[in-house]
Amino acid sequence: LAQAICDASKRDPWTPPGEMGCNSSKDGPTVVANVKAVHNPDSTWHTPVARALCASGGGSRALSYTMGVYRGLNELNLIPKLDAISSVSGGTWCSSIFMFAKSYKGNDVTTVDLVGADTTPALLTMSELSKAPGAIASGIVMGDSDKILAESGIEFVGREYEVWPHVMSRWLLRNFDALKEMKSYMALDDEAVSRIKTANPQ
């Protein structure tokens, strides 16, 4: 078990790509996380995985694509057969909501509510395509991401490390009651949340 300290919040946001240096003049929180090397044959991170879903990044396009994958898997009744889900960036925007959303706009939410109803491509019309998407994409189709980003950038001048979490809360997670709260945790259970809080008292 290795202990990793992620201090990306102190990274200078204007550093050119490829230069992942930190700007020590920007004070932000340090996050402590437990990291396990899962590539070792004796890893106890999880039980053996026979079927897994890996979702890549790519912002809102990755979210839309991943939501379509979940919809297809749901239509084929294959989601219960997945042993693991691994995702990054935009794929995680979708997967995190899929895994942790319990309610949507104050109501209990089902898998079909999240990913959208089954579709037959040959029957899709412009009228059908203009209907509201699955709940996972409900925040990103509002057309106000630039406004939310600009307002958050102004609100957190001097605390730029707070911009992105607030943008995600106000944009992507806005319709998911528990997930949009800044103090909520997307974790396996209450024990995991307690461990995270203990390791990160700030």
Image (tube, rainbow, N blue to C red):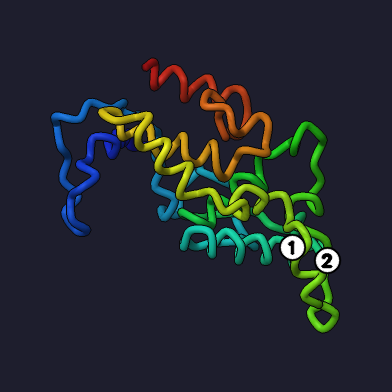
Dot 1 amino acid type: Arg
**Quarter of image, res 176:** top right
| Front residue (pair 172, 191) | 172
Residue 184's label in the rendered image is: none
How far from the left and from the top, in percent, is residue 200? 39, 21
Would you identify the image quadrant in which residue 54 lies?
bottom right
Q: Is there CB contact under 8 Å for labels 2 and 1?
A: yes
Local packing at callout 2 (Cα closer than 10 Å; few below 14, some 14-19, many 20+) is: few
Q: Amino acid at mark 2?
A: Asp
- Horizontally, is 39 left or right of 10 in the view? right
Please, which residue is most extreme toward the bottom here?
Answer: 122
130 and 123: which is toward the camera: 130
Q: Which residue is mark 2?
A: 118
Q: Position of residue 23 (x, y in %)?
A: 15, 37
Tell me the quadrant of the picture where the N terminus can be found.
top left
User: Quadrant of residue 5 in the image?
Assistant: top left
Residue occupying image coordinates x 46% and y 63% = 58
Q: Is residue 144 above or below residue 51?
A: above
| Residue bearing the label numbered 1 | 71
